[in-house]
Image (cartoon, rainbow, N blue to C red):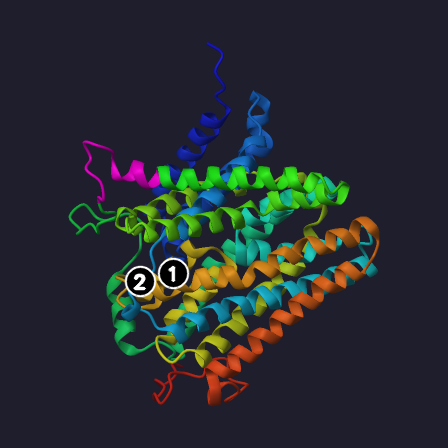
Amino acid sequence: MNFTWSLFVDLGVISAALIAATLIRAKVRFFQRYLIPNALTAGFILLPLYNYVFPLVGITSAGLGELAYHLLSISFVAMALRKAPPREARGDSRIFATSVAVLSQYALQAALGLLLTLVFILTVMPQLYHSFGFLLPLGFVLGPGQAFAIGTGWEVSGIAGAGSVGLTFAALGFIVSCFGGVFLINYGIKRGWLEPRFVEVLKAQGIKSGVYARDAAKPVGSNLTTETEAIDSMTFNTAIVLLCYFAAYLFLQAMTGLLSLVGPLGQELAVNLWGISFIFASLIGLLFKAIFFGLKVEYVLDNPTLNRIAGLSVDVMVASAIAAISVVVVSRLIVPILVLSAVGTVVALLTVPWICSRIFGDHQFHRMLIVFGVSTGTLSTGLALLRVVDPDFETPVASDYAYASGITFVLAIPFILSINLPVRAFVTGNMVFFWIAVAVSIGYLLFVLVSYILLSRRRAFARPAAIWLGQPGAVMAPRSA
């Protein structure tokens, strides 16, 4: 029987790599010490195989990019459907401060990336495309799915291999998140940034193998909201997620039909909208959630189950996205990729602790870790770093970030929409589009600066030469030799 197996071949290969990566994490101390996510390891296992081995037997990486594209939107829908924590469990100023801290990295990385790209164009690489600098924040802050989806959308404008370059930035961002995060943990402990009681918790944890021990208490991963004999709760929640994604597809199809009536410009805009379909998928998810609340049936949505759906999507997406990187394409642009990645790394390592130690009034170190993790990797790496010092999520940091992510998403929409402007500069030669994109990034910097001053108040510029200010009114622990 002539069925299509390509999707399940890719899923089978990715599954084997994820299992192998889990065994590696459980046995090899290096991967435990630096909290390397299994999906990242799996992706790097598959990268040479999909580039050099599998093509010999007819298996290509063509389907991996599509898989990452769809899983990205599915993960965003699952996160959008999650119910917000109770009002008393939230701290509104902390939530907004978290969004400001993350947006600072969007703005800094975008502005520096675009300006460094212009330097390369004017000097040693005149053929470099103007939107190249946007791949730094796309890969570091937004993640592999977004970097691939938007980069691939640029390819219709004659920018070859942008999707693979975006995935490369995301892979380097994961590496920075893991190694940089562990560096910040060790450096912060030596410098007395972390409260002593959390240091004791850290010392008592031992090595994180990534797998619970045989006799360890297993946390509950989800709750049942439906009778299993009628429909499994996982099935029901997954069906809602997929229905939202299907609704997003229908919406984009309708928009494409309407924009095509405008002419070539409208058709080009329609293509760009498909490149950021995850935004529309999230908005549809928020709409569905509002409908569920309006009908007073929101109780059938289970946050832990939605977390599992998002987690599955992200793990498979990360592994497939890294495996889809074209080594041939990336090798041609390795110098600007490494230069921009190095700049992004230094900026994150210096500015995230500086900002977080001043803008937050509680759990500064914890909040700094999750902001650094999501500003260089994804939410999963941010949570992994947080769990090192807060294994049971006893602090409100994780829940505050979960709610702040919605605010950050809304605030970042103009930024995401501006990402296609430098492409117009590349295609038309009109640098006005490029400078508008730079102006948008600078506008975000001004917004972040004003918000930061209002939130930090007297602490905003206290001891400006110190990378870490410390708890308000707290006595810093003595520094280790």
Looking at the picture, tell me which residue is in the foreground, 307 or 257.
257
Residue at numbered disc 1: 402
Q: Is residue 419 left or right of residue 345?
A: right
- Amino acid tagged 1: Ala
Is the stretch drawn in magenta largely helix, strand or loop?
loop
Q: Residue at x 52, y 69 (%)?
A: 349
Q: Secondary structure at mark 1?
A: helix
Residue 432 in view here: yes
Q: State the residue lying farthest toward the top.
A: 1
- Percent x, y of residue 5: 48, 21
Q: Residue at x 44, y 69 (%)?
A: 98
- Helix, strand or loop at label 2? It is loop
Nearest to the observer: residue 288 or residue 134: 288
Please state which amino acid type lies under the numbered disc 2: Pro
Residues rendered magenta in the picture:
224-238
How crowded is the residue under tag 1: few (<14 C-alpha within 10 Å), some, or many (20+)? some
Tell me where residue 15 appears, x and y as whole percent.
40, 34
